[in-house]
Structure formats: C-alpha cells, structure tokens
Amino acid sequence: MTVKDRRVHLFLQLFFLAIGLYLFVKLAFSIQSGQFSGNLFEFQQSDLPALSIAVSIIAGFASIVSSFSLWTRATWAYGFTLFTSGFLFSYHLLGLGPAIQQNSYEIIPIVIVLIVILQSFPFLLRRSYRSV
C-alpha cells in the first residue's frame, strides 16, 4: 500500500465514521423535534416515517461498521465499504429532492457526501478487486 493509498484509506475511515454519526444525530434531532409526530405507519408528506427511521438507522450503522472494518483492515472491508457507499449514495440522492423543496441548507452536506462517495468509488473498486 502506497502512502497515497494509506491517506485515502484513513480519510475514508474517518469519513464513514463521521457520516454514521451525522445520520444518527440527524435522526435523533428529527425525532426530538416532532417531525415524526403521530402514527409512524401512516403516510406523512408522501413518506412513511417508520421506513425513513429504519433506513436512516441501517445507513448509519452500515457506515460505522464500514469505518471500523477499514480500521481493523479486515479482508471484507473494501467490499462492504463499497456496498455501504452505494447505499449511502442512493440514500442521499433520494434525500436531495425533499431538501431542495423544504430546507435548502440541508443540500450542502448532502452534496459533500455525494461528491466524496463518487470520488471514492474507483479506490474502493480497485482495492476490493485486489483483496479477493
């Protein structure tokens, strides 16, 4: 592993840890603010709150697991991180529409996450191919 690969590896490890914590804090703030008030299994603004909560928990948990797998340098770390990257990319891309309509300040972290994930795909693809 070259110095450049080590730096990218460390950056991705810290990035996935930060994204996992960000998703959990954002979910806790949403629950505390009463955004999911009422029944969780009834549609609110063309969205099912129970599924939104579940997907946010799964995305945050997968990000933290990816961060720790990169930290321990497990053999499956790059493949799982690639899967988590795809999951986070689709999660944030689908969250971009409501963010544009409701709160434009949420666009900034979403776009940053999308750009970093897109730039990390070649590294993760190369490393997951070599680890097999």
Image (cartoon, rainbow, N blue to C red):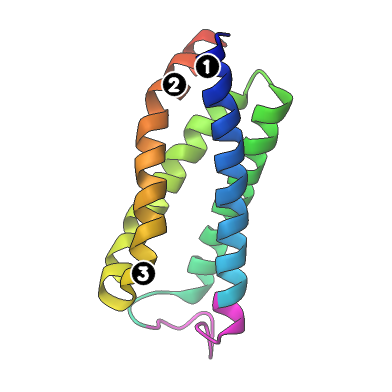
Count of numbered badges drawn on the protein: 3
Q: Toward which corner of the image does residue 101 lie, by quadrant? A: bottom left
Q: Which residue is mark 2?
A: 123
Residue 93 position, x and y percent, is: 33, 53
Residue 72 image point, x, y percent = 73, 26
Q: CA distance from mark 1 to mark 2?
A: 8 Å
The span picked out in magenta is 30-44
Q: Amino acid at mark 1?
A: Asp
In the displayed structure image, the side of residue 123 where residue 93 appears, left or right: left
Reading the image, the residue beneath label 3 is 105
Q: Tell whether 122 sits left or right of 56.
A: left
Q: Is residue 35 magenta?
A: yes
* Closer mark to the observer between disc 1 and disc 2: 1
Who is closer to the viewer here, 41 or 46? 46
Query: Which residue shows up at 38% across the image and 22% down it?
Result: 122
On screen, 116 above or below 57? above
Helix, strand or loop for disc 2:
helix
**Is disc 3 placed on a helix, strand or loop?**
helix
**Residue 62 at least partly seen:** no
Q: How far is mark 3 from mark 1, CA to CA?
A: 33 Å
- Residue 85, relative to residue 94: is it above or below? above
Q: Which mark is residue 5?
A: 1
Residue that appears at 64% across and 28% down: 70
Mark 1 or mark 3, which is nearer the start of the sequence?
Answer: 1
- Where is the C terminus found, in terms of image quarters? top right
Q: Position of residue 128 (x, y in %)?
A: 51, 17
Residue 66 lies in what quarter of the image?
top right
